Image (cartoon, grey):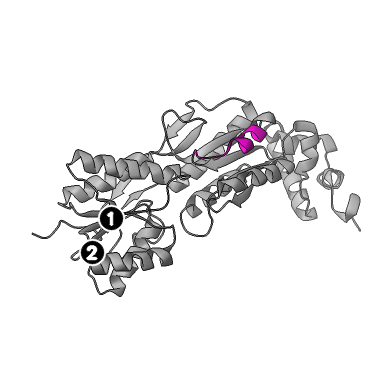
Amino acid sequence: MKQARSRKGAPGILDVAKRAGVSPATVSRFYNAPDVVRPVTRKRIEEAAQDLGYIRDRMAGTMHHGFSGTFGLIVPTIDNAIFSEMIEAFSTRLQEHERTMLIAAHGYDLALETAIVRSLLERRIDGVALVGFDHDTVPFNMLEQRDVPVISIWNYQEDAPLPCIGADNRKAGSLVMQHLVDLGHRDIALLFPETGTNDRARDRLKGALETAGQNGITIAPDRLLSCPYDIGESKAFAEPLLRDNRPSAILCCNDVIAHGVVYACQGLGLSLPRDVSVAGIGDFRGSEHMEPGLTTVRLPARRIGRLAADTLLTMCETGMMPNPPNLAIELVLKKRGSTARIAG
């Protein structure tokens, strides 16, 4: 017998109620407050919805509850491994709570954030996670005017201007620099991107330079080099440094740059860590399995993603700021084969 259908031929809540043998109000309670529905009834509704191929209309629920069930995540890039684990964890956590994610990338061009935020607001997002603290004021004003919860992720500062969940990037730079110093390195080159609008890189650089100074080491201008987050470009950039004026160690702002430096070493026939030590920050997928394994600082990307999702959900449902507002995630230095004590 042909089942009754709602508008546009898709099964609706009335169809599910009829098939499950319950009232439409019970089906509505199941989706909005499942704990108040008896387990045996929940099972009948679940089976009926599955049999019919029913898809819940969350936007209709928005009319009554003010929530769309969708959260925005704005990242600088999805072009490499930098944020991939965090994005996956954020999305998975939302799915566990029957929520969805809209993701956008601005390619390290903060001027694009205003258009991105406007687009997300047009889709009635329930909250937004942004990477870092360097942002224009316009998108913040747009979010504040509409009382949309917003948090910063990936970086941590005790006096952060908005709730944050991330790692102390200043400490990350300090950890890896101290590791190289403890191995006896004094001639250390630093490969970092432009830090003007990248607070994570800026904090790592501050930590590295401070720790070098505390150990009586001055980083000469020709050892502080600007390099983009790109494996191919960092490989090409590192080759003349390694060939013509090789330091004993290279500290890279993240593992993407470090991977490029390792490939440059291999292309020039250099042996790691005998000829040069290389270290990164991030511990991205694949860094442990390089040959030799890359010494790096582990950023707990998955934990940051999960906590970010949980925090936004709580802020959305309670209307309250997180307590504590700023959460620092522990860093771990992973000592592997790409670094070693300086010869002699």
Q: Quick one: 119 or 73, which is closer to the camera?
A: 119
Q: Residue furthest left?
A: 344
Amino acid type assigned to the residue bearing label 2 in the image: Asn
Would you identify the image quadrant in which residue 229 lies? bottom left
- Give the prevailing secondary structure in the magenta stretch: helix
Q: Quick one: 210 or 290, which is closer to the camera?
A: 210
Q: Is residue 329 left or right of residue 105?
A: left
Q: Give percent across and percent down for residue 175.
A: 28, 44
Magenta highlight on residue 137: yes
Amino acid type assigned to the residue bearing label 1 in the image: Asp
Q: Quick one: 91 or 124, which is closer to the camera?
A: 124
Q: Secondary structure at mark 2?
A: loop
Q: Is residue 98 visible?
A: no
Q: Is residue 113 left or right of residue 196?
A: right
For the residue carrying disc 1, how many other residues have a C-alpha within 10 Å: few (<14), some (14-19), or many (20+)? few
Q: Are marks 2 and 1 in contact (CB under 8 Å)?
A: yes
Q: Which residue is mark 1?
A: 222
Image mark for residue 245: 2
Task: Say which residue appears at 90% left-offset and 50% top-offset.
Answer: 7
Q: Earlier in the sequence, mark 2 or mark 1?
A: 1
Q: Which residues are magenta?
A: 133-143
Magenta highlight on residue 323: no
Q: Quadrant of the N terminus?
A: bottom right
Q: Quadrant of the C terminus?
A: bottom left
